[in-house]
Image (cartoon, helix red, strand yellow):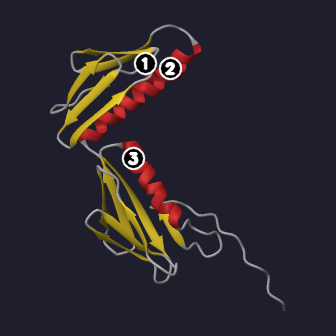
Amino acid sequence: MSRIGKKPIPIPDKVTVTLNGANVAVKGPKGSLERTLPEKVTVTQEDNTIVVSPVDNSRTARERHGLCRTLVANMIEGVSQGYSKQLEIIGVGYRAQVQGNKLTLNVGYSKPVEMQMPEGVTAAMGEKNTQVIISGIDKEVVGNTAAKVRAVRPPEPYKGKGIRYQGEYIRRKAGKAGKK
């Protein structure tokens, strides 16, 4: 059995969970999420906790046990607290702008790169115009959106210019050795 899967998931106040077979719907103060879980796993609600258990002892059931528990826990945390990823833009003249649901990046290309944020995800500027905060209630969508923004100009190893996650360490390389 999965060590993660064995842990019961506490349901905080102001969050309601609806179980309908393999469908799990979670409503909270930040919004609502719905997901269909894979087969070979059962989800039950006991008092103020949710318990995920495998149907049998097959390999696929054991594999999906911890996964499904984590998916449900992420849904509950998302509708109660939300998720956010912070990105830093490093480079001379590199900056970002947010206009409505559109993120515009000026990162050294001939034209600015415009990215439309998916539904349920918002982009905001940090203290400077070189910090972008991507937030939402679905952890998977927030992470994928942040990865797509980072992929526009990933950090390069020589000068460290590009878009990186806040606190991300970029391994630097030495440049060419000059003639003496």
Q: Are marks 1 and 2 in contact (CB under 8 Å)?
A: yes
Name which residue lies at 40% across and 24% down. Answer: 37
Q: Which residue is mark 2?
A: 2
Dividing the picture into quadrants, the one containing residue 77 is top left
What residue does disc 3 label? 141
How far apart, in angstroms, are the residues tagged by discs 1 and 2? 6 Å
- Quarter holding the C terminus? bottom right
Q: Return the x and y of residue 103 as percentages of the image width and height.
A: 36, 67
Element type at mark 1: helix
Mark 3 or 1: in front is: 3
What's the residue type where badge 3 is placed? Val
Whether pointer 3 and pointer 1 mark residues with C-beta atoms closer than 8 Å, the reply is: no
Under mark 2, the amino acid is Ser
Q: Residue furthest top?
A: 56
Q: State the CA–CA distance, disc 3 to disc 1.
A: 26 Å
Residue 104 position, x and y percent, is: 38, 71
- Please tell me whether residue 55 is drawn above or below residue 116 in the rendered image: above
In this picture, is 1 found above or below 143? above
Task: For label 3, count other residues whose C-alpha is less than 10 Å away and answer few (under 14), some (14-19) or many (20+).
Answer: some
Q: Secondary structure at mark 2?
A: loop
Residue highlighted by disc 1: 6
